[in-house]
Image: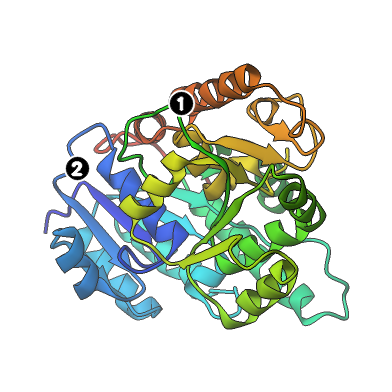
């Protein structure tokens, strides 16, 4: 049976909350060539996603190797894109069943091609006495096997490029920054709500950012630089409780907890607030969805320290914030937005990915 031109293996698609799934869907939407025959193979939630996204070719394999194997066999000589993070496919981050499934498919359909996007890689800083050490060791073995099966490898940070070489011996991993999972729905305007700040993302990231800027937030509130702080993202009992402890000393009308909002509502906020707080660093900015969302909407981004490399050089450090002029602030907003448009906009990402693996082309696999 002739398979679709492109098969995307991913976690779970919108409306379910999952950064990797959102990335997978947005990449599909911005693939520059014909994507009418794209099929998604997801862990779960296929029926809900198919109805919400109006895309009928979404099937779930329930985290089972046998079901994924049957689905891949049905697609035949396809171009397959796997979005990988260990915990996305296994509770403890070690999907040992995944490499054999792909190896079997490639052996049976040698004209098929495989691109793997490594969104996450195992850590290296756990002591041998930690259970996470052994989990990450297992994940490293999975990553090594997957990397050696892939025709093309893509990842999102320079650290990951280095780790892939260390783990698998391959030095041809391509670096592509992620784009914003929140697409702008409002035109860019200079006029914004003065003194309104926003922290956006998943629960752990929001708590981490609040913790990082806790002293400054209290100082800015006292001086009038900060008048309101918007917290946006899905709720989590543990991290929401920790976040509440960090903001408990602020006046009662300072913090607005929005919880999870639809993308258009988040975009509206991003287009109105004056500042976004980020925990992005030179090592991880290229995989920070929150940083990219701020950049895409022309929101002034506040970082902990001044950085001279792009794009962080266009952010505002905590030391600069009380002193920066309105003219300089507007300049950095526009420059960061322009940088995003030229380097991380979804049309740019789609073009880069399609050039790496044009659908229908054939390339001998790496052995």
Q: Mark 2 points at which residue?
A: 35
Residue 261: x %, y % from top left: 38, 62
Residue 256: x %, y % from top left: 53, 63
Identified at 34% across, 44% down, the residue is 27
Identified at 31% across, 63% down, the residue is 14
Of residues 181 and 23, which is closer to you in this image? 181
Q: How many labels were placed on the picture? A: 2
Residue 350: x %, y % from top left: 35, 35
Q: Name the residue under label 1.
A: 190
CA separation in Å, label 1 and label 2: 36 Å
Decide which of tag 1 and tag 2 comes sooner along the chain.
2
Left or right of 93 on screen, residue 220: right
Do the numbered discs 1 and 2 sit on residues whose CB atoms are within 8 Å?
no
> Mark 2 Cα within 10 Å, few/some/many (few <14, many 20+)?
some
- Residue 272: quadrant of the picture: top left
Left or right of 298 on screen, residue 70: left
Left or right of 244 on screen, residue 95: left
Up/down of 65 relative to 275, above or below: below
Identified at 35% across, 69% down, the residue is 16
Identified at 19% across, 64% down, the residue is 52
- Residue 91: quadrant of the picture: bottom right
Up/down of 193 relative to 355, above or below: below
Asked whether residue 41 appears in the rendered view, the answer is: yes
> What secondary structure is marked by label 2?
loop
> What secondary structure is marked by label 1?
loop
**Discs 1/2, front:** 1
The N terminus lies in which quarter of the figure? bottom left
> Mark 1 Cα within 10 Å, few/some/many (few <14, many 20+)?
few
Tell me the number on the disc at residue 169: none
Of residues 228 and 71, which is closer to you in this image? 228
Asked whether residue 111 appears in the rendered view, the answer is: no
Residue 289: x %, y % from top left: 52, 48
């Amino acid at each position: 049976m002739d398979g679709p031109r492109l098969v995307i293996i991913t976690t779970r698609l919108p409306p379910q909350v999952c950064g990797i799934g959102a990335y997978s869907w947005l990449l599909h939407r911005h693939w520059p060539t014909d994507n009418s025959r794209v099929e998604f193979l997801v862990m779960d939630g296929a029926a809900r996603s198919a109805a919400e996204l109006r895309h009928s070719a979404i099937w779930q394999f329930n985290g089972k190797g046998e079901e994924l194997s049957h689905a891949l066999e049905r697609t035949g000589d396809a171009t397959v894109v796997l979005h990988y993070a260990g915990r996305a496919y296994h509770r403890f981050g070690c999907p040992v069943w995944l490499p054999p499934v792909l190896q079997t498919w490639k052996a049976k359909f040698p004209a098929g091609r495989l691109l793997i996007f490594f969104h996450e890689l195992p850590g290296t800083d756990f002591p041998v006495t930690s259970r996470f050490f052994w989990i990450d060791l297992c994940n490293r073995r999975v990553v090594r096997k997957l990397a050696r099966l892939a025709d093309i490898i893509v990842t999102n940070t320079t650290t990951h490029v280095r780790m892939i070489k260390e783990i698998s011996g391959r030095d041809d991993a391509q670096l592509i920054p992620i784009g914003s999972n929140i697409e702008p729905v409002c035109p860019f305007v200079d006029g914004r709500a003065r003194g309104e700040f926003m922290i956006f993302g998943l629960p752990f990231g929001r708590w981490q950012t609040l913790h990082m800027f806790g002293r400054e937030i209290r100082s800015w509130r006292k001086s009038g630089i900060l008048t309101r702080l918007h917290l946006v993202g899905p709720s989590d009992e543990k991290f929401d409780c920790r976040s509440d402890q960090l903001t408990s000393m602020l006046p009662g009308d300072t913090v607005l907890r929005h919880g999870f909002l639809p993308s258009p509502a988040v975009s509206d906020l991003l287009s109105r607030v004056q500042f976004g707080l980020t925990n992005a660093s030179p090592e991880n900015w290229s995989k920070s969805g929150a940083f990219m969302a701020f950049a895409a909407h022309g929101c002034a981004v506040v970082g902990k320290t001044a950085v001279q490399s792009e794009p962080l050089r266009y952010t505002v450090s905590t030391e600069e914030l009380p002193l920066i002029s309105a003219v300089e602030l507007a300049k950095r907003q526009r420059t960061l937005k322009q940088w995003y448009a030229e380097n991380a906009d979804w049309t740019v990402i789609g073009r880069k990915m399609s050039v790496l693996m044009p659908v229908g082309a054939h390339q001998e696999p790496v052995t």
